[in-house]
Image (cartoon, grey):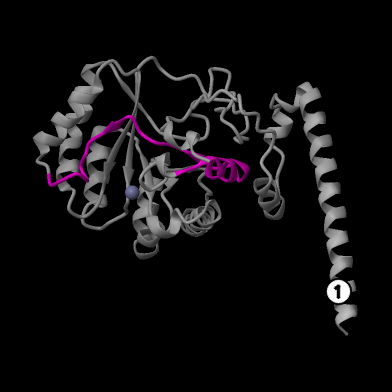
Amino acid sequence: MIIEKERKFEHISYSAKEILLLIGFFTVLTTLILALNPLATSTTPATANTAITPILRTVQLTKPLVDPANTIIRTTYDSNGNPPTAPGLAMKARVFTAEPEKIVYITIDDGPYPQNTPHLLEVLKKENVKVTFFDIGRQIEQFPSLLKAEYEQGHSIGNHSYSHNYNSLYQSPEAFLTDIQKNDDLIFKVIGIHPKIIRAPGGTSCFNINYYNLLDANDYMAFDWNLDTKDTDGNFSVQQIVDNVDKQIGNKHKIILLMHDLPNKASSTNALPIIIKHLKEKGYSFGTLSPQIMPITFPEGFRKK
Ligand SMILES: [Zn+2]
């Protein structure tokens, strides 16, 4: 009996060795092919549009692509739409729309809420400005008619996750994606679109390389911001919110502005007409986010394995 077990064990060890050798052989072969093939480093539209099944995605991410130690980290797309670069990063190239010289994308996170969103929509209608709402699934579930109203008024709709729960979202890239997809399905049920633009709760500084890869493989694009109204830092007055914005405009050509339509953020909504006025005086026009707009992304996540 014992002998039989030992034999069995020997047999298994031997097979494992064989498998390891085979994996090693194919890894070396794949690395060589990728290194020698110039197409492997450029991204063609055909590659960009290739649909990847969920199973393949997972496999792809457990085995990172060519990961030379000397990969230069570039945390933005370049002007030709080539993706950021970092060791292990495998995002696709994109085609972006040309933007005006001075442009602002107002983004409104965490809603919808009946205490604030309807008033905000009225203000935006009066100002004739379109914005991007990054909505949360559990809010949409409660107030689907508010999502509908945002969409029907011509605003852009983005995905800010279903739960907005950092503990579950940042457990793993797969957990993050599942939560995003849950909200995606919900938005589709209410307004019949699958938004491809997302805002990570807390921003992409919570990401590592695998988050970008998995989201990109699923065709999602993450947008951070470069101007924060700071309206979640405290209970600011209208004037303080306006001041927070004015101080950060500087020489920026392109602004992605962050604010919230949480129930206690009436001052953000009331500050909006003044913010819009100041930005117009400085020569900015207003746009909405879409996958055709080059994102602004925080650099931190690209440096994390
Ligand atoms: Zn948020």
Is residue 117 found left or right of 203 in the rendered image? left
Which picture quadrant has residue 288?
Answer: top left
Q: Is 290 situated above or below 52?
A: above
Nearest to the observer: residue 135 or residue 12: 12
Residue 126 % position (x, y): 23, 36
Residue 132 % position (x, y): 37, 39
Nearest to the observer: residue 36 or residue 12: 12
Is residue 284 found left or right of 264 in the rendered image? right
Q: Residue at x 52, y 34 (%)?
A: 291
Quarter of the picture containing the N terminus is: bottom right
Q: Which residues are magenta?
A: 207-235
What residue is pinned by disc 1? 6
Q: Is 232 situated above or below 89?
A: below
Whether residue 69 is in magenta: the answer is no
Residue 164 shows up from this direction: no
Callout 1 secondary element: helix
The residue type indicated by label 1 comes to Glu
Q: Residue furthest bottom?
A: 1
Which picture quadrant has residue 129?
Answer: top left
Q: Residue furthest front?
A: 3
Whether residue 218 is in magenta: the answer is yes
Q: Is 149 situated above or below 300?
A: below
Residue 32 % position (x, y): 81, 29
Residue 285 % position (x, y): 33, 22
Residue 55 shows up from this direction: yes
Q: Residue at x 61, y 36 (%)?
A: 88
How many other residues sit within 10 Å of disc 1, few (<14), some (14-19) or many (≥20)? few
